[in-house]
Image (cartoon, rainbow, N blue to C red):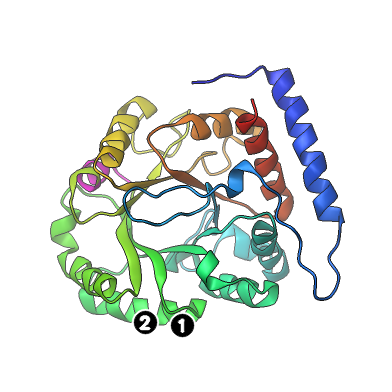
Amino acid sequence: MNRINRRDFMKRSASALAVTATLRNGATHAGETTTPLQNAAAKRCALGNTGLMPTRLGVGTGTRAWNKDSAQIRRGRDVFINTLTRAWEQGIRYYDLADMYGSHHYLRDAMTEAGMKREGLFILTKVTSKTGAEIQSDLERILGEINTDYLDALLLHCMTAGDWPEQMAECMEVLDKAKEKGIVKAVGVSCHHIEALKTAAAHAWVDVILARINPFGTLMDGSPDQIIPILQQAREAGKGVVGMKILGEGNHADDKEQCIEYAMNLDCIDVFTIGFLESAELDEIIALMNACDNA
């Protein structure tokens, strides 16, 4: 991996933050839009063989989430909407949602308030229902909650067993039909067990995998040495691989530089998503990505 001197990294980070602050302080007037900062986070990347091109950084919306609640929601609507909008102003176009997070209508409101164009966004969401009828109902409801005619990616959320294709066969059939109609562009799974991940990497049905990866093995399905070959196998098979838990769900906030450099140098993921509680955290990560990219 390409390593950089810490002092140089911090100088570049400070410089990138200064540019970000300049844009941030240049408040927009009525009828004007902020020019997105050209940055490493906003780079469009191919997601496997799906034909989809999300930005390199995705905005996670479900930090410590459960039962349609999350750390983002607990911070309050205005803060959440501001963070989503700030990401769009910075050129980020990938929003990572889930039914479990309760974040769909927050993105809808941010899209409306900021004037985001749907065709420029990459919207990924996830569902936890276990029957075909439930998945069909979820899909129809979610489209309404986001106010969109289609989803770029819809994943079966939190697979924990190696035989998940047998368990989720009805759901997969419903998603296949939605994909045929263009309502869903790509399908796949988020994994929370190494056996589920191994199955996903090899299964022909899967277009996209959401997998936990960071240099410390925190909240992962195994050590990095165990997980990376599986993700490499998935990419070699043409699957899109999205990294998550890049900072170990905040457990490595003091190691952000190392975590970001690690993620940006991995050859086994296409893009990655990080959950932000406020726009200042987003700006900091963008600055770190710029510093790493320019090293």
Where, by quadrant of the figure, is residue 28 drawn?
bottom right
Residue type (three-letter) at the residue carrying disc 2: Glu
- Check disc 2 and report the residue beneath it: 140
Left or right, 116 with reference to 99: right
Residue 159 drawn above or below residue 139: above
Q: Quadrant of the C terminus?
A: top right
Q: Considering the numbered disc 2 on the image, is that residue within a helix, a strand or a loop?
A: helix
Q: Give percent across and percent down for residue 195.
A: 22, 41
Where does the image place residue 116, in percent across and percent down from the top left? Answer: 62, 71
Residue 171 forms part of the magenta stretch: no
Residue under pointer 1: 144
What is the span of residues highlighted in magenta in the rendered image? 192-200
> Does residue 44 appear left or right of residue 172 in this picture?
right
User: What residue do we see at 47% from left, 28% from top?
Assistant: 216
- Which numbered dot is residue 24? none
Distance Cα–Cα, label 1 vs label 2: 7 Å
The residue nearer to you, when weighing 194 against 244, is 244
Q: Is residue 95 above or below residue 114?
A: above
Q: Disc 1 marks which amino acid?
A: Gly
Local crowd size for mark 1, using a 10 Å CA cut-off: few (<14), some (14–19), many (≥20): some
Residue at the location (51% across, 39% down)? 248
Residue located at (21% from left, 66% from top): 172
Q: Position of residue 98 (x, y in %)?
A: 44, 64
Q: Secondary structure at mark 1?
A: helix
The answer to whether residue 199 is magenta is: yes
Task: Measuring from the top left, give residue 41's x and y in whole percent.
Answer: 60, 45
Q: Are marks 1 and 2 in contact (CB under 8 Å)?
A: yes
Q: 260 or 71, which lies in front? A: 260
Whether residue 119 is situated above or below residue 281 in the rendered picture: below
177 horizontally vs 25: left or right: left
Q: Residues within 10 Å of mark 2 (few under 14, many from 20)?
A: few
